[in-house]
Amino acid sequence: MDHKVIIIGGGASGLMLASLLPRQTAIVIDANSKAGEKIRISGGGKCNITNAKMDSAYYLGESRFIENVLKCFTEKDLLQWLERQGLHPVLRKESQYFCPHTSQELLDILLKESRKQKILHNEQVVDVRKRGEIFYVRTNRRTVTAPNVVVASGGLSFPRLGASGIGYGIAAHFGHTLQKTAPALVGFTVQKEQFFFKTLSGVSTDVVITVGDKKCQGSLLFAHKGISGPAVLDASLYWEKGKLQIDFLPGFDWRSLRHTRKKISSVLPMPKRVTKAFLLQFSIEDKAGTTLSPDEYEKLRTLNTYSFAPAGTFGYSKAEVTKGGVATEDVYAETMESKKVKGLFFTGEVLDVTGRLGGYNFQWAFSSAYVCAQHLKRD
């Protein structure tokens, strides 16, 4: 037997777990030449670590399972742990905690703390089997053994950084239920009727997007592929197919347009390019509000309830996370251990738990790693 614990994946959850376990008890297997590559590029290199507004309501998944994990290692616990390591996250956008300068600061701490374990780079896990009480993990270079295996391999997002479906394959092999996976926190491509969005590439405007009973507020960025930006990324977490609704003018008082001699593009609180693009679509001249016909006025009011069906998403190569994954009903929230196979654990993104934009997915990665580490240390 080589080690006590084999950790498959050197991302946020895998590195945190390696950091929390006693020295020289685990081996981390990572497919990249450097561990934590997804952390390094997160948030455009700024890395939104966690959020002061932490609740299961900000996640897609089984709420009680999520609550039980988060309460064991809260956002306050994470901040205190980071401060003990010399990192003091800064509060931005009211409730979001970021690295003070770059995501490399967080990555450096995790790499430093996880050095107490052995880390194998550039090794892809090919197969995992269990004989008796021992797991045999075969990579493209060797076979390692241990009585405990933690699958912290993440999802399918960012394949260029070594993302793969190995975690789902391991789970399926051992009889776990898999919930359908899809790119999440990702932009939408558009149908022919919305191709005019592409002419606005680079322009952003504040919106509220409604998907089912969920509302996502923030900026929408027009892109050459379709639409992106914080509100869109959040909406992608809940959208599967069919229509969604965008309020391009949240809170706008339409009386201010009805009784003004100013041009429409000067009154509507959107970038003029956006307003003029919609006027063109509605076949309405950019004219004084007082000259609008009742029909034209009603057409403009549909900007509060603009409904359309995205053609799809930008895909896994642009998605920040993968939604779906290993069903949490097959995992103990108190330990992250499989209910089906003793010694098999799942943490982080590989599970069917996905957070909204704002640091929620990092918190989940760290909280689930903490729960797993506490059990392994007791064991």
Image: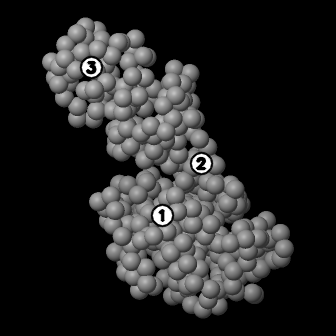
Tell me: residue 347, above or below residue 264.
below
Say which of marks 3 and 2 sits in front. 3
| Structural distance between the alpha carbons of marks 1 and 2 | 17 Å
Q: Residue at x 61, y 89 (%)?
A: 116
Question: Identity of the amino acid at label 1?
Answer: Lys
Q: Which residue position is annotated with label 3?
A: 263
Q: Which residue position is annotated with label 2?
A: 318
Say which of marks 1 and 2 sits in front. 1
Q: Secondary structure at mark 3?
A: loop
Question: Identity of the amino acid at label 3?
Answer: Lys
Q: Which residue position is annotated with label 1?
A: 46
**Mark drawn on residue 376:** none
Residue 152 visible in the shown view: no
Tell me: residue 27, above or below residue 124.
below
Front residue of this view, candidates 259 and 360: 259
Tell me: residue 157, above or below residue 199.
below
